[in-house]
Every structure is written in C-alpha cells, then in structure tokens.
Amino acid sequence: MTAVSKVAIAGSGVAGVAAAIRLAEAGVAVDLFEAKPELTALGSGITLQGNALRAFGELGVWPAVQGKGAFFEGLTLRAPGPGAPVVAELPDVKTGGPDYPATGGMYRPDLAQILVARAQELGVTVHFGASVTGLHQDEAGVDVEVGGESAGRYDLLIGADGLNSVVRELIGIDTRPEPTGMGIWRAFVSRPAEVERSELYYGGPVYIAGYTPTGPDTMYAFLVEKAQDRAGVSDEEAARIMIEQSRAYSGPWDAIRADLEKGGARVNYTWFTKHLVPGAWNRGRVVVIGDAAHTCPPTIAQGAAQALEDALVLTELLVRDDSLSDDLWGEFHGRRIPRATAVVEASVQLGQWQIDGDRDADAPGLIFGIAHRMAEPA
C-alpha cells in the first residue's frame, strides 16, 4: 500500500515528470498539469552530472537519454588569448557511480520529450495549457483548481512548477529567487571535431566562457557576464553580443563565432538566481520540489540532478509508507534539505569568487568536495 493513490503534479520539468514516472510505476493515478500549451521545441543545452544520469537509470530512460546526448569524462580549462592554451585537464568525480559517465550534455527539448513520453507510457495524464490557480486542503485531501475551475480532489499536490512557482505562493511560502549578479548567454551551435568534453575559459572580458557537447555534431556555448537588463534584445543583436564578447577567446570559439555569424542560431539570456525554501517544503498535503524549492547558479551544474533527487526521494517514501505522516515528511526533509543547501551555497560561492576577483579562492577544492558528497546516493 502506498501513502497516496491519486496525485496532482504542477510542472513538466525534470522534477515533476520524474515524480510522475515513479508514482505511476507504483500504480498511483497521476495528473500532471503544465501551463505551457505544449512541449516547446526550442531551448539550449543542459549539463548533466553523473548523479542525474543515475536517476535516469532508475526512471528507465537512461538508454534513450544516452542515445540523444553526449557523455564524457573530465573537464578542460583554457586561458583566453591566442591559441586558447590549455591550463589544466581535470578529472571528474563519477557522482553516478561506476556504471555511468561522469557527466554529459544534451538538448533540453530532447530530454523533456523523453521524460514525458515515459510518463505517458506508464499512464500519467498530461494536461498542457493547464495552470494551477488555486487549492484548498484539509486533513483528508487537497482540491486543486486549474484555470480557475476545479480539476478534482487529490491525496497530494506536488508543486514542481519552477523558479516562479505558483504552488509555492499558494501555500504561503514567501521565499523568492534573488539575482546573484551574473547573467548568461547561451547559444546552440555546431560542435567542432576537436571538442570532446566541456571546456571552460576563466578571465578575459567575461567571467566564464565555455561550451558543452550535446550530441555528435552539436553543443551549447555560453558566456557568463555581469547581469544586465537585456530585455528586448533581438536574436540578431544577441548573436552579435556573443560574437563581440567572445573575441578574446580562441580555439573552438573561432568556430562558434563562425556559426553565430551565419545567423539563425538560438540564443537566450537569463540571470543567475538563488533561493532555498527554509524549513519544511510542504504545507500539509502540498509540497514543492525542484526549482520551486531551490535554485542556484549553474557553476557546478547540479540543478537538474538535485531536482531529480528531490523527486526520487519523495516518491520513494510515498511508495514505501502507507500514510502522509510527520515521520515521512521528517525523513524527506532530513535527506533533501542539507544536500540541496550544500549545492546552493557552493554554487553561489563559486560565482561570488568570480565577481570579487578572488584569485586565492580554492574553487577546485570546493568543486571536488561537493562532487564527492554528491557521489553518495541521496
């Protein structure tokens, strides 16, 4: 017997769909509500650490993910300037264990499609163009409103509706994402043959320049700058900004600029943010997970992995126990809050060292310390 038999989930990101998959596998009826009208075909790349890949294995989608992405070991550090000299070749900690690559990248929409297809295969009902707008709960259940109308009564509502979570607001949690002072340009481009894994350039006109393979012929390139108001910048202007800001970087960046010069590249810009819901992430029969509960700069690329871990730990307990008890919530928070806090704090610290220009900071030590912690299963 499970703690729940009918669950509503808000949000079709990795946390929400992972939770839907695990619950459906256990025979729980799941309605997943996504505000967007459909799975978008647009997006950039995503970096996935080994503990995220291990989660995909548990969800039964690792073969499909592996077939669509690019996976590798290690990280290359280069310097700006002519020839883009290699400064260091760093090994990766295999946070997913010996059965999975250390890290990888893939096209975000491909990942979304794989996960949603798996959920639907298991019987999850996915509602697009469906925004959760209200809820009312009591000791026995939670009534969910979608688009201002009743969507039904559920044993649990999982708010996995992202950075600006409506569910978080509806249950009275006033934690909000805060900017960290950095902004990032991302472009989906072709992959030069010489790029075999993620590479980062520190120094020069931006804080970080880098790229990550996402497939045999594709990768996403990024430039991390001081956060600015980039609202209203056209696609052409965005490409031009990336071209100009990257001129200090040679090596594969020469090929990236050539791609951007051709026009038509998909470029987007976002600010880095941070937040962590303090204390309990649930209010009665409603809980927030993933980006609704915590976000951080992608400086150690643990965002997707932490969202997946939230979903897997929560659903493990929901399937194991026979009621939504205080003990269940206590174990969930005990396993997830310290781990998510460590990732948020380390990610923010790495970015702040860049902003402050702190050349004495032990960034490698912090990165490897967190990686070893993430290698222990959640």
Image: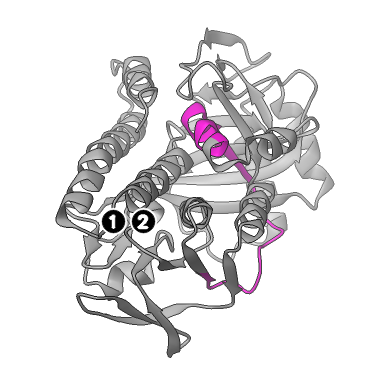
Disc on res. 1: 2
Query: From what the image shows, is residue 231 above or below residue 293?
Result: below
Q: Which residues are magenta?
A: 32-57
Residue 200 percent across, percent down from the top left:
55, 24
Visual colour scheme:
one colour
Residues 90 and 96: in front is 96
Real-space CA distance between mark 1 and mark 2, rounded to the nearest whole angstrom: 6 Å
Is residue 282 left or right of 376 when viewed as pictured?
Answer: left
Extreme-front residue of the structure: 1
Report helix, strand or loop for mark 2: loop
Is residue 193 left or right of 321 when viewed as pictured?
Answer: right
Q: Is residue 139 magenta?
A: no
Residue 241 percent across, percent down from the top left:
63, 47
Residues 280 and 231: in front is 280
Report helix, strand or loop for mark 1: loop
Residue 89 percent across, percent down from the top left:
55, 9
